[in-house]
Amino acid sequence: MMLKSFLKDWKKVDYIIFFLIIPLILTSIFLLPTSIKQNLILNPLNPTLISIFFSNYTHTEAQHFLSNLLIYLITIFLLFNIETNRKLFLKVALLNFILLPFLVSWFIVYFLPKLPPTQGFSAILSSFVGYILFSSYSWLRKNCYGKLNYSFLFLLLMVNFLIWSIFEKGQLFYILFLITLLFLFLNRYSIKTILEWIISETKRNLEENLLSFAYKIFILSLVIFFTFSLWTLLPSNIKIGKNIINIAAHYLGYCFGAFVPLLLERWKNDTQ
């Protein structure tokens, strides 16, 4: 399956930033005294510049912090395995860490001011999950079928919404089903080519190193799950105990991660 080795194609500074510095920042903020963290949590009715930004890095509950940190590490681990454009990834990551917190917080302040005080890394985390969708598409285009176009990316996105609509059990399912069928038809040759390539590569890899093959299957399985994981970010039950899941932040983050790299790629192609 030709997935890149985790230890190749990335610089030491990449590992230091994404696997050490970012987790240390999140941990340091989590360990701050409660009296300080209260100033970092965003109150939509009384926002401050500090809370608008730092609320996206703040956690007051250990379970919330640990779950976000774990999923972040898994997500970055997968991206380090499948990402085909290091420079694009670094640009998107920078926008995730710097620009996205302001966009999400301002959206909440202006459009959802009645929400309770918000905090957490979920919006940025959702953006990296959305980026996996784009990165999966880019990897397939580079390694499987060079003529793959953006309609395939939208097919992946529509499948995500279709899965989500199944859990919602609404009439929207039928509309999304028809749209998904349309994108399946438009990408029928691409899908056929990719499936033939996967079968060929599977046979070839089975004849080689079994441990390497097992690693590739492990990564591939995780990538498939995260590529179609939008339903986990937009649950129908948004209240867990006393906490309310900010699905608006999840949705905005996911769309940011899925479409910003597309826009950056198109902008680069148009300027060349």
Image (cartoon, rainbow, N blue to C red):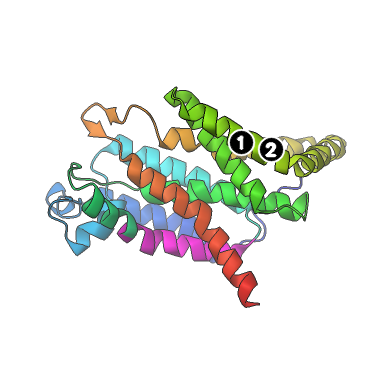
Q: Residue at 46% of width from left, 50% of height from top?
A: 255
Q: Residue at 76% of width from left, 44% of height from top?
A: 190
Left or right for 156, reference 52: right
Q: Residue at 51% of width from left, 43% of height from top?
A: 74
Q: Position of residue 43 (x, y in %)?
A: 16, 50
Q: Are marks 2 and 1 in contact (CB under 8 Å)?
A: yes
Q: In front: 39, or 190? A: 190
Question: Mark 1 Cα within 10 Å, few/some/many (few <14, many 20+)?
Answer: many
Label 2 is placed on what type of residue? Leu
Q: Residue at 57% of width from left, 70% of height from top?
A: 267
* Residue sitting at the far bottom: 272
Whether residue 207 is visible to the viewer of this picture, yes or no, is: yes
Say which residue label 1 marks. 180
Q: Look at the image and give the residue range highlighted in magenta.
A: 85-102
Cα separation between marks 2 and 1: 6 Å
Above or below, 194 against 236 in this view is: below
Q: In front: 151, or 219? A: 151
Q: Position of residue 140 (x, y in %)?
A: 71, 49
Mark 2 secondary-structure assignment: helix
Question: Mark 2 Cα within 10 Å, few/some/many (few <14, many 20+)?
Answer: some
- Image quadrant holding the N terminus, namely top right
Say which residue label 2 marks. 184
Q: Is residue 158 magenta?
A: no
